[in-house]
Amino acid sequence: MTISNALASIAVESLSESLVWYEYLFGRKADARPMADVAEWKLPGGSWVHVATDADRAGASVLMLIVDDIADELGRLDMYGIKPVAKSIGDFFKTAKLRDPDGNMIVLSQPQQGTY
């Protein structure tokens, strides 16, 4: 099997209530709105993040995003009232865990220099 790309899916109770939070997270409006209850953001590497209304799975999703500068991202998100619930520094990554309005875990991760 050859995998050429990936689509990560985040389930929310109501897209209309979560959409602004994800616009803040990604720093822009969705790149695609293929259906009324779906918003998608394309990432620089070519993969996509798909946020969709799915009440049965809402709050159980986990997404890890690799960022260049975690301090800059946290500073930007803080302007919108989005604060990490946990932060850590390991041998290979600095991480910050965020929770969206439904409780989904979004992990920002910055590779330590020379490890990625």
Image (tube, rainbow, N blue to C red):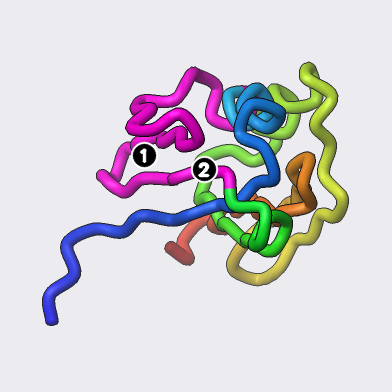
Q: Assign the C terminus to one quadrant of the image.
A: bottom left
Q: Residues within 10 Å of mark 1 (few under 14, many from 20)?
A: few
Quadrant in the picture for residue 82:
top right
| Residue in view at x 44 percent, y 45 percent | 50
| Residue in view at x 39 percent, y 33 percent | 35
Residue 17 position in % (x across, y down): 71, 28
Query: Compared to 39, does 30 lie above or below?
Result: above
Query: Cα distance, mark 2 to mark 1?
Result: 14 Å
Mark 1 secondary-structure assignment: loop
Direction from residue 88 to residue 66 in the image, left or right: left
Query: Compared to 22, does 1 lie above or below?
Result: below
Q: Assign the N terminus to one quadrant of the image.
A: bottom left
Q: Residue furthest bottom?
A: 1
Mark 2 secondary-structure assignment: strand
To which residue does mark 2 refer?
Answer: 51
Residue 36, magenta (yes or no) = yes
Tell me, for residue 27, which label it has, or none.
Answer: none
Q: Which residues are magenta?
A: 24-53
| Residue in view at x 61 percent, y 34 percent | 15
To which residue does mark 1 refer?
Answer: 43
Residue 64 position in % (x across, y down): 56, 57
Residue 7 position in % (x across, y down): 35, 55
Q: Amino acid at mark 2?
A: Val
Quadrant in the picture for residue 69:
top right
Query: Compared to 101, does 54 lie above or below?
Result: below
Residue 116, magenta (yes or no) = no
Quadrant in the picture for residue 18:
top right
